[in-house]
Amino acid sequence: MKHTDLTPRIWAALVIFGLFGQVAWVIENMYFNVFLYNTVSKDSKAIAVMVAASAVTATLTTLLMGSLSDRLGKRKLFIVSGYLVWGVSIMSFALISVENTQRLIPAASLATAVAVTVAIVVIMDCVMTFFGSTANDAAFNAWVTDVTDPGNRGKAEGLLSALPLLAMLVVFGLFDPLKQQGRWDAFFLIVGGLVFAGGLAGLFIIQDRGVKPGRDTNYFSNIIYGFRPRAIRENRALYLILVAMGVFCTAEQVFLPYLIIYMEHYLGIADYALLLGAVLILASAASVIMGRFIDKYGKQRFLYPAGAIFTAALLILYATGKTLQGNSSATMLTLGIFGTIMMAGNLVLMAILSAGMRDLIPEEKRGHYSGIRMIFFVLVPMVIGPFIGSAVIKGGKTILDEFGFVQDVPNPEMFLAAAAVSLLAFIPYALVMREWKRDADGMEKTGDK
C-alpha cells in the first residue's frame, strides 16, 4: 500500500468545508428538531416526518448531483455555489414562527397555524437540504475521494469523522446560548452566514483534482448504474460495507434526533452544553488518534471492537437514564464517561466503514457513489431510525406544551432500542470481515504487498 502525504491546502479544505458543512448539518439534524419541538409542536412524529423527508431529499439530491459532477468533471462549481445558497437557506429560518404564520393567515385557528408552521419547517428543511447535499454530500464527498488514496484515507477519515462532533462543540459553545435565550433569529442568521463564508473561501482553496468528464455515457445510465445487479456483483465488498453502514447509522438515528430534548426535558439537565462539549472533545480526539492506527494496522482489527464498544455504551446509557436524573454529580459523571465511550465507538466505526468504502469506489463513478452512499448513510437510517425512536417514546413521560397540547418526552428506552439495532449490525460486519480476509489472502497468494 502506498503512503502519500496530503498537502496543507488539502488539509485546510478538509477542515474548513468539513467543519462548516457539519455545523450546518448539526443545525439541520439536531437543532431544527429542537426548534420545532420548542417553538412549534412537541409531537415526536412531526420530528420523525421532518427527518425522513430531509433524508429522502438528501439522497435523491446527492445521487442526481453527484452523477452530474462526474459527467461535468467538476466539483468546485458545485461546492462553492452550493455552500453560498446553503447559507442563505439557513438564514431564512429566522423568519419562521407560529406568530408569523398567524399574521399570514389571520383567520386560521391556533391548531391550523401550528400545522401550517410545521409544514413550512419541513419544506424549508428540504430546500436547505437540497443545497447542502449538493455542496457537501455530493461534490465535497466525491472531492475527498479524488484527493486521497488508500494510504492516507484513514487519517483523512479520522479527521472527517471527528468533525461532526467538533461541529456540535462549536454550536453548543457559541450558538446554544442564543437558543437558550430564545433568540432563534440570531441563531440562524449567524450559522447561515458562517456557511456562506465557507462558500466564499472555496473560491480560493478548492481545486479540482484530475476528474475526467464522463460525457461519453448517458446521464440516466450513470444515475442507475449503482442499482444494476451486475454492478452490485462486481462490487460485492463495497455494497456489504454500505449495508453495514446502513444498519449502524440506523441505530444512531434512533436516539440522535431526540438527544438534546431528552437531556433537557427528561433528565432535567439545563447546562447540557458543557457536558456534551466535554464528550465531544474527548471522542473527537480519540477518533483522530485511532485514524492513524487504522492506517497502520488495518481496518479489520478495529471493526468488531468498535461495534462492541458502541453497543455496550448504549446499554449503559439506557441504564443510567432509568436510574439517575437531574444535575447530580453521579448523573453527569456517568453520562460523561459512557457518552464519550459511545461517541468514540461511533466515530471509529464511521471512520473504518467510510475509509473501506472509499477504497473500493470505482474511480470514474466517485460522484455517483456519493449518492449510493447516501441511501445507506442517510436515507435508510433517517427514515427508519427516528420512527423507531418515536415509537418507544410514545406512552412514556408527557408534558403540557405552551399551546395546551399533551406531548411525549424522549425517554431512555430509545438507547435500548438503538442497542438492539446496533447488535443487528454485527451480521453485515461479519460479512465485511470475510470479504477483507478473502482480499488479504488473495494478495498473499499473488505476492502483492
Image (cartoon, rainbow, N blue to C red):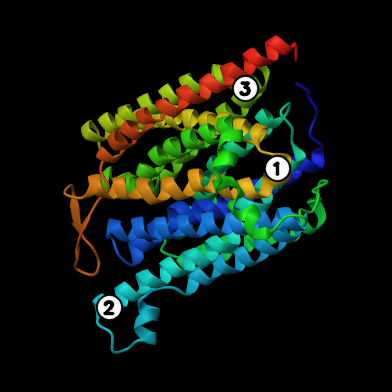
Height in image: 315 above or below 77?
above
Instruction: Give yes or no for contact between labels 3 and 1 (Cβ–Cβ under 8 Å).
Output: no
Residue wearing tag 1: 144
Query: What separation in Å lies between label 2 and label 3 (alpha carbons)?
Result: 53 Å
**In the image: residue 434, left or right of residue 419:** right
Q: Is residue 282 visible?
A: no
* Sequence-first tag of 3 and 1: 1
Kindly state the secondary structure of the residue where label 3 is placed: helix
Q: Which residue sits at x=50%, y=55%?
A: 27
In which quadrant will I find the N terminus? top right
Q: Residue furthest bottom?
A: 107
**In the image: residue 127, left or right of residue 258:** right
Residue wearing tag 3: 294
Q: Nearer the viewer, residue 184 or 257?
A: 257
Residue wearing tag 2: 112
Q: Nearer the viewer, residue 244 or 226?
A: 226
Q: Which residue sits at x=33%, y=67%?
A: 40
